[in-house]
Amino acid sequence: MFNNAGIVGAKGPIDQTPADEWRITTDILINGVFYGVKHAAAVMKQQRSGSIINMSSVAGVMGGLAPHAYTTAKHAVIGLTTSASAELCQHNVRVNAIAPFSMATPMVADAHLQDHHATDEVAKTLAANSPLPGRAGTALDVANAALWLGSDESGYTSGLTLTTDAGVTTGSIVRRPNYDDYVPMQKEAGNRGV
């Protein structure tokens, strides 16, 4: 089971973040994962096997990379992953997380360039700033991580947060989000506001 639904959500300085945007963002990014794990666990415990994969982010591993609500939620996803892993291992159910950096996707293109169709342009920007010269991360990189975590090849792996970040979490790149200006929350690519 792969908990992969998400949004960027509330953006801007912490003292200007609207409470309703904070609640919507954390509801989707935290509660959505909780309910996914809860209902998958109920089935997997009975069958005595399973793999649950939660989408986090490098923003859940370190601060200063993304908006506050997103960062908070992605830290919570990692906490839930390790907590559920500790509980469900006795039922032969594995729980892991994937923590990507910015990938060349419509959501990232919208967040960086305000155009969810600009995936080629955002890929060029990401590649130019990547710790791996000329290499942007792609959805396929995340899919391959999910395939491995969902397969028997990772059968002795549980409680892991697997980064797909070209080494960003090692300190290979420093980039801070723009906290200066308030903008309406971002949902899926091309859709903003409450």
Image (cartoon, rainbow, N blue to C red):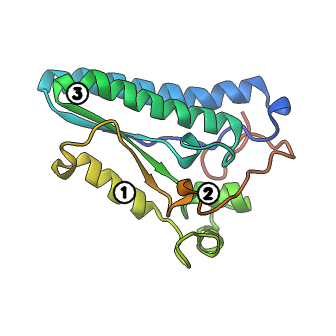
Under mark 3, the amino acid is Cys
Question: Mark 2 highlights which residue?
Answer: 108
Under mark 2, the amino acid is Val
Q: Residues within 10 Å of mark 3 (few under 14, many from 20)?
A: some
Identify the secondary structure beneath mark 2.
Answer: helix
Residue 101 appears in which quarter of the rendering? bottom right
Query: Residue 96 or 117: which is nearer the viewer?
Result: 96
Q: Nearer the viewer, mark 3 or mark 1?
A: 3
CA gap, disc 2 and disc 3: 34 Å
Residue 147 appears in which quarter of the rendering? bottom left
Question: Mark 3 highlights which residue?
Answer: 89
Residue 108 in picture, x, y percent from top left: 61, 57
Query: Residue 24 or 11: which is nearer the viewer?
Result: 11
Q: Is residue 78 above or below residue 121?
A: above
Q: Is residue 164 left or right of residue 174?
A: left
Residue 118 in picture, x, y percent from top left: 64, 68
Identify the secondary structure beneath mark 3.
Answer: helix
Residue 9 in picture, x, y percent from top left: 66, 39
Residue in view at x 79 percent, y 50 percent = 178
Q: Residues within 10 Å of mark 1 (few under 14, many from 20)?
A: few
CA gap, disc 2 and disc 1: 16 Å
Q: Residues within 10 Å of mark 2 (few under 14, many from 20)?
A: many
Instruction: Name which of mark 3 and mark 1 comes first in the sequence.
Output: 3
Identify the secondary structure beneath mark 1.
Answer: helix
Is residue 101 at all visible to an observer of this figure?
no
Question: Mark 1 highlights which residue?
Answer: 143
Marks 3 and 1 in Cβ contact (< 8 Å)? no
Q: Is residue 24 above or below residue 9?
A: above
Under mark 1, the amino acid is Ala
Instruction: Name which of mark 2 and mark 3 comes first in the sequence.
Output: 3
Labelled disc at residue 161: none
Residue 72 in picture, x, y percent from top left: 61, 32
